[in-house]
């Protein structure tokens, strides 16, 4: 009997021990589960001024990033355009309610970095073991540097190229070689207007086209010493007068202008696709909105006796200084993802913008795509062979603002180029002198 009672006692004792073990494991699992549930996810905003196909692709990549990990949630906030993004960011900085990440142009990024409104990325880059900054296209990566520090990562490269209707050129026996310089392009435009009663060419409204064409004639924005604004030189005046006459006097060219955001841009594209114009000068990023069964791409021309020298620019992803440390870290992680070989190749294939990493060309899908869609290589070839460096305005935007106002006078109001550019030179020079005197 004694042995039976002892055995019963042992059985009960082991049962209690087992119960405590199971209960302990269950508690550990519940605590671990609770810790996972309570793990903080960093949520940030990313502001960008893109619409249409570009905006759709940006939203897609943000979603893919969010689904690729569980530590960061990026909320994309679309703005009307790049200018509106900058204006709203300035207001947000003043209110101290900023997005963690933002898409900026070179000029605006420089202006904000100099005001210490952006966070330097050097420490983040040093800690990112797989970052490999030497894989970036150097001319794009260097545009994110201010005062020896990296304040931005290039998200995509851009340069303006030509898009023309194959059917119109073929019907009229005009060779695409006519697009090799502006003089022969104008002759082709005159033939097209006469024979088809459509516009022969459409420059894109804004300073970009006219700056590119002026640089391609040998003009410069500043002298070598950086002390004098040169936009009233013979090269600039002759270039701008060429376009003013083609638009307002000969009426073989035309521009769309005004509207909300990128409205004028898409109207220009529609004019070509709907056969109201034979071609236009637009962004490498237009390729996602174009029908290449109708149009082909061509590098921007130079002038007789001058090689082409259009600008190769980059759009930059920056981190705001007022964002918290956790938000800044999350923003850098997202921007690193966007600039990875696979994602920059994906962005290039779907938008036409230039991939920012050299290794993107080795991505299998990119190789296959470029073989089937040779137009994607035109901006890349132009960026590598014939481009000027993007201008960084030492006045924080006053010189570029003066140029933009002069563009409207010439392209919209039919003011002679010499008059518009001399007034712009005076305004820009005054701003430059103030900077140099301080």
Image (cartoon, grey):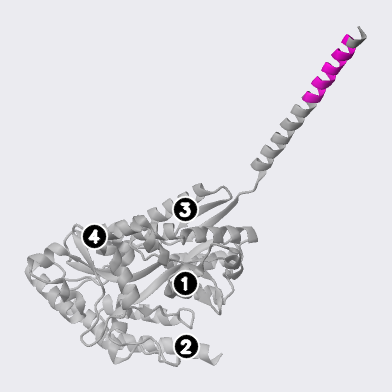
Looking at the image, is mark 4 or mark 3 earlier in the sequence? 3
Looking at the image, is mark 1 or mark 3 earlier in the sequence? 3
Q: Is residue 100 visible?
A: no
Q: Nearer the viewer, mark 1 or mark 4?
A: 1
Contact (CB < 8 A) between labels 2 and 1?
no
The residue singled out by tag 3 in the image is: 62
Q: Position of residue 126 (x, y in %)?
A: 60, 68
The residue singled out by tag 1 in the image is: 141
Q: Nearer the viewer, mark 1 or mark 3?
A: 1
The residue singled out by tag 4 in the image is: 270
Count neighbours of disc 2 (C-alpha within 10 A) and say few if under 14, some if 14 to 19, many if 20 or more.
many
Residue 246 has which mark? none
Measured Cα–Cα span from mark 3 to mark 2: 40 Å
The residue singled out by tag 2 in the image is: 432
Looking at the image, is mark 1 or mark 4 earlier in the sequence? 1
Q: Is residue 265 visible?
A: yes
Q: Residue at horizontal 30%, vertical 62%?
A: 286
Q: Position of residue 76 (x, y in %)?
A: 48, 54
Looking at the image, is mark 2 or mark 4 earlier in the sequence? 4
**Where does the magenta region start and end?**
4-18
């Amino acid at each position: 009997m004694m042995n039976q009672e002892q055995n019963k006692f042992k059985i009960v004792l082991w049962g209690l021990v087992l119960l405590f073990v199971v209960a302990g494991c269950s508690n550990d699992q519940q605590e671990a589960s609770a810790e996972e549930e309570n793990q903080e996810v960093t949520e940030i905003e990313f502001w960008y001024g893109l619409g249409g196909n570009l905006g759709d692709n940006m939203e897609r990549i943000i979603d893919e990033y969010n689904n690729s990990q569980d530590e960061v949630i990026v909320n994309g906030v679309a703005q009307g355009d790049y200018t509106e993004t900058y204006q709203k960011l300035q207001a947000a900085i003043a209110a101290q309610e900023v997005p963690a990440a933002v898409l900026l142009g070179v000029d605006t990024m420089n202006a904000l970095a100099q005001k210490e409104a952006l966070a330097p990325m050097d420490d983040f880059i040093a800690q990112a073991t797989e970052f490999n900054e030497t894989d970036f296209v150097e001319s794009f990566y260097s545009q994110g540097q201010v005062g020896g520090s990296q304040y931005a990562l290039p998200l995509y490269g851009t340069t303006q190229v030509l898009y023309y209707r194959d059917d119109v050129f073929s019907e009229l026996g005009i060779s695409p070689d006519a697009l090799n310089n502006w003089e022969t392009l104008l002759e082709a435009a005159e033939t097209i207007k006469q024979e088809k009663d459509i516009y022969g060419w459409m420059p894109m409204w804004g300073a970009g086209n006219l700056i590119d064409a002026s640089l391609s004639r040998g003009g410069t924005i500043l002298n070598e010493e950086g002390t004098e604004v040169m936009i009233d030189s013979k090269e600039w005046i002759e270039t701008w007068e060429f376009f003013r006459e083609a638009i307002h006097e000969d009426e073989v060219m035309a521009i769309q202008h005004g509207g909300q955001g990128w409205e004028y841009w898409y109207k220009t594209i529609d004019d070509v696709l709907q056969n109201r114009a034979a071609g236009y000068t637009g962004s490498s990023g237009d390729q996602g909105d174009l029908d290449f069964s109708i149009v082909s791409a061509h590098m921007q021309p130079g002038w007789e006796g001058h090689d082409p020298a259009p600008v190769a620019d980059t759009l930059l992803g920056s981190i705001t200084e007022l964002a918290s440390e956790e938000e800044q870290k999350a923003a850098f992680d997202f921007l690193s993802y966007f600039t990875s070989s696979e994602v920059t190749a994906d962005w290039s294939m779907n938008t036409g913008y230039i991939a920012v990493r050299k290794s993107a060309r080795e991505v299998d899908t990119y190789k296959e795509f470029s073989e089937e869609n040779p137009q994607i290589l035109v901006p890349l070839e132009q960026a590598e062979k014939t481009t000027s460096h993007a201008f960084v305005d030492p006045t924080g935007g006053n010189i570029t603002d003066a140029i933009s106002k002069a563009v409207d006078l010439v392209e919209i109001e039919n003011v002679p180029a010499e008059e518009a550019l001399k007034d712009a030179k005076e305004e820009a020079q005054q701003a430059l002198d103030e900077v140099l005197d301080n």
